[in-house]
C-alpha cells in the first residue's frame, strides 16, 4: 500500500512537471530541465555510482574533469526527460534530427530487408525507434520497464504516440519481449535494442577491460536469421538538434566466432562512441557491478 501511494505521488509530480514545461518552446524547456538536473544530480545517491563508473572508464582524469563530465551527463538526462514528453514534436520537426550513413541501410529501406538496430544510452536514445519507423522500417523495440507502473504507462504512451506506423511496437524486456520479438520476426519486422546496460541473466563479456554481465540473445537471432546488425551512433548537437549515424552492417555468420567474441567486438565499437562523447552517456547505471 505504501509503495502504491509513493508511486502515485511520483506520477503526479512528474505530470505536473510535464504540464509546467509544456507551455515553453521545446528548446527552452529542454535546457531548463537540463540545468535543473545538472544542479541537483550531485545530491542523488546514484551520482556515486556515476563517479565510480567514470573512474573505471576514464582512470586518468582528475576529479574536476570527472565532475564536469557528470554535470553534463545529468544535464543530458534532464533534457531527455522533458523531450520524452514531446517525442512526437521532435520526430516531426523538420531538420531536428540529422542523419548520416543512409547508404548503410539502403537494402533495409529499398528492399524491405530485416535488420537488428542497436544503440546505447547516449544523447537522447528515445528518438531512435520513432526515427527508424519514420524512415519506413517496421520495428519491434525492447526496453527496460519502469518499476512505477503509473509512470510506466505514461512513458509507454509517449513512445507509442511518436510512431508513424502502427506496425512498429515496444515490448518490455523479459519473457514477453522474447515472445513478441519472435512473432515480429515472423512478420518481417526489424529489431531495435540498447546494448550498454547490465543484464543479470547474461554472460560475462569484457567492457572497458572489465567482465560485465551482457545480453547475447540478439546475436543468436542475428546468426540464426542471417540478419545484419546496424549500430546507431547518437549525438546531441549544440544547436538543440541531434545527429544519428547509421554504421556499417555487422554480420555474425562465421561459425568459428562465438557470441561472446562477437559481442566483445561490438563492445569495442560502443566504447569508442562513449569515449568520443562521454558527457552524453548515462553513467548512473550499475554497469560494472
Image (cartoon, rainbow, N blue to C red):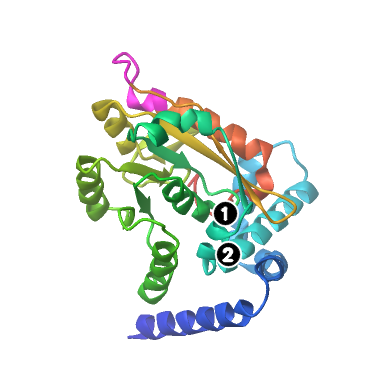
Q: Is residue 133 left or right of residue 178?
A: right
Q: Is residue 225 left or right of residue 55?
A: left
Q: Is residue 63 left or right of residue 74?
A: right
- Residue 153 in magenta stretch: no
Main SS of the magenta part reads: loop
Q: Which residues are magenta?
A: 253-262
Q: What residue is drawn where x is 35% and y is 31%? A: 111
What residue does disc 2 label?
Answer: 83
- Residue 256 in magenta stretch: yes
Q: What residue is drawn where x is 39% and y is 63%? A: 160
Coordinates of residue 244 in the picture (x, y in percent): 58, 42
What residue does disc 1 label?
Answer: 124
**Is residue 125 positioned above or below 36 on the image?**
above
- Which of 175/96 is in front? 96
- Which of 73/180 is in front? 180
**Is residue 5 positioned above or below 29 on the image?**
below
Mark 2 or 1, nearer chain start: 2
Query: Circles 2 and 1: CB distance less than 8 Å?
Result: yes
Q: How many marks?
A: 2
- Which of 68/117 is in front? 117
Dot 1 alpha-carbon crowd within 10 angstroms: few under 14, some 14 to 19, many 20 or more: many
Q: Is residue 150 left or right of residue 178?
A: right
Amino acid at each position: 500500500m505504501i509503495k502504491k501511494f509513493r508511486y502515485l505521488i511520483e506520477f503526479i509530480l512528474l505530470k505536473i512537471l510535464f504540464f509546467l514545461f509544456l507551455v515553453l518552446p521545446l528548446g527552452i524547456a529542454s535546457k531548463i530541465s537540463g540545468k535543473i538536473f545538472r544542479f541537483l544530480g550531485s545530491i542523488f545517491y546514484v551520482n556515486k555510482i556515476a563517479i565510480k563508473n567514470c573512474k573505471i572508464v576514464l582512470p586518468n582524469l582528475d576529479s574536476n574533469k570527472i565532475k564536469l563530465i557528470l554535470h553534463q551527463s545529468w544535464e543530458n538526462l534532464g533534457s531527455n526527460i522533458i523531450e520524452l514528453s514531446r517525442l512526437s514534436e521532435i520526430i516531426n520537426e523538420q531538420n531536428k534530427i540529422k542523419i548520416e550513413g543512409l547508404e548503410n541501410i539502403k537494402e533495409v529501406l529499398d528492399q524491405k530487408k530485416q535488420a537488428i538496430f542497436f544503440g546505447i544510452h547516449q544523447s537522447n536514445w528515445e528518438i531512435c525507434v520513432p526515427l527508424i519507423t519514420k524512415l519506413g522500417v517496421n520495428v519491434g523495440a525492447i526496453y527496460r520497464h519502469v518499476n512505477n507502473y503509473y509512470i510506466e504507462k505514461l512513458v509507454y504512451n509517449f513512445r507509442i504516440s511518436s510512431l508513424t506506423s502502427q506496425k512498429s511496437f515496444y515490448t518490455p524486456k523479459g519473457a514477453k519481449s522474447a515472445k513478441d520479438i519472435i512473432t515480429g520476426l515472423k512478420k518481417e519486422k526489424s529489431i531495435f535494442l540498447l546494448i550498454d546496460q547490465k543484464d543479470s541473466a547474461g554472460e560475462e563479456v569484457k567492457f572497458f577491460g572489465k567482465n560485465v554481465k551482457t545480453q547475447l540473445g540478439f546475436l543468436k537471432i542475428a546468426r540464426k536469421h542471417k540478419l545484419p546488425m546496424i549500430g546507431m551512433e547518437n549525438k546531441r548537437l549544440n544547436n538543440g538538434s541531434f545527429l544519428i549515424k547509421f554504421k556499417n552492417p555487422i554480420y555474425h555468420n562465421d561459425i568459428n566466432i562465438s557470441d561472446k567474441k562477437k559481442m566483445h567486438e561490438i563492445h569495442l565499437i560502443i566504447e569508442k562512441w562513449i569515449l568520443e562523447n562521454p558527457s552524453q552517456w548515462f553513467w548512473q547505471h550499475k554497469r560494472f557491478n
